[in-house]
Image (cartoon, grey):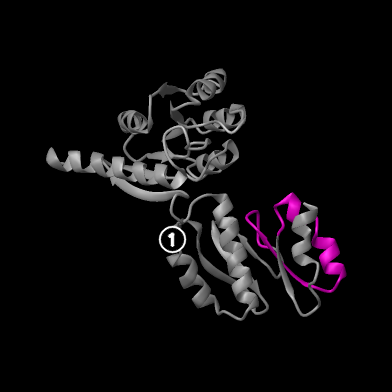
Amino acid sequence: TAHKGRVFARQTSDDTAVIDADDEGSSAFLPEVRARGVRVVEVSIEGVPAGGVGLDASGMLVLDAHTGPVALLHRDELLIRGDHNVSNALAAAAAAHAFGVTPDAIRAGLRSFEPIEHRLEPVGTVDGIEYFNDSKATNPDAAIKAVDAFVGRPMVVLLGGRNKGSRFDDLARVLAEHDASAVVFGEAAGEIARDLGAGGVPFERAVDLAGAVAAAARRAKRGGAVVLSPACASFDEFSDYAHRGREFRRLVDDIAAAGAGRGG
């Protein structure tokens, strides 16, 4: 945390600091930064801070400008998913506004920003089921963020690869809270299965990613999502996470092509 605070170290009263008020690590610097006369703009998904940018009770991203509150867009209009990405969008809006960008331009930028490859990247919809590539999620904390992004939707999560020394009990707890199921695969399948089983999460096992995608397609419900968010490194089967993500995309394309070949 101390190292993160160094980003504010050389700021003066001519500068602006955008700080996430919801994050304990960053909000701890609020008093210190303000005491130096730096202009502070807070962002929050738990409300709209005075003079900041936040999420109101209806799910609108709102800029509290000097002329009054300005609604930017609803969180559902963002192409990026999850509370962490809403926080990122709020911070981007705050920074842009500090540079004099107009609310209309900020709104257009937020509305058009697309997910980064391998980070909750939509890769296709087949038989009413959406598929997402989150191959860059190589630890359980990252996978938890992915699961939280689909609250209220039935989902199947693909978990597996090479364990980086992690436990999966916290991930199992979040999966159980969201009534999600999983397919485990690869070198770490046994370790993940142990924690999911202890947490009461329904799952099945597959040998490799191809088998996991096929199993997930069978388990998934129309209107739901299949998410590759492995919580592990890729090196048991692939050269890196990007290779794994590209292969996942190809497998989804194959499922779509097979469906089309059967006449839908």
Q: In this view, does 146 lie above or below 39?
A: above
Taking the magenta stretch, the answer to whether it contains residue 104 is: no
Q: In this view, does 58 lie above or below 212?
A: below
Extreme residue toward the right, this view? 35
Quadrant in which the C terminus is drawn: top left
Residue depicted at 19% across the width and 43% down the height: 257
Q: Residue 90, percent across and down? A: 60, 63
- Tag 1: amino acid: Glu
Residue depicted at 72% across the width and 73% down the height: 16
Say which element carries label 1.
Answer: loop
The foreground one among 156 and 154 is: 156
> Is residue 74 toward the left or the right of residue 24 in the image?
left
Q: Residue 177, percent across and down? A: 55, 31
Q: Residue 175, percent across and down? A: 52, 31
Q: Which corner quadrant of the image does residue 102 belong to?
A: bottom right
Residue holding disc 1: 114
> Is residue 34 toward the left or the right of residue 261 in the image?
right
Q: Decide: few, some or many residues near mark 1? Use Cα within 10 Å; few <14, some 14-19, many ≥20.
A: few
Residue depicted at 57% across the width and 38% down the height: 139
The foreground one among 78 and 131 is: 131
Q: Residue 234, percent across and down? A: 47, 37
Q: In this view, does 227 lie above or below 12?
A: above
> Is residue 246 toward the left or the right of residue 127 in the image?
right
Can the viewer see residue 56 in this picture? no
Can the viewer see residue 64 in this picture? yes
Residue depicted at 38% across the width and 50% down the height: 122
- Range of residues picked out in magenta: 20-48
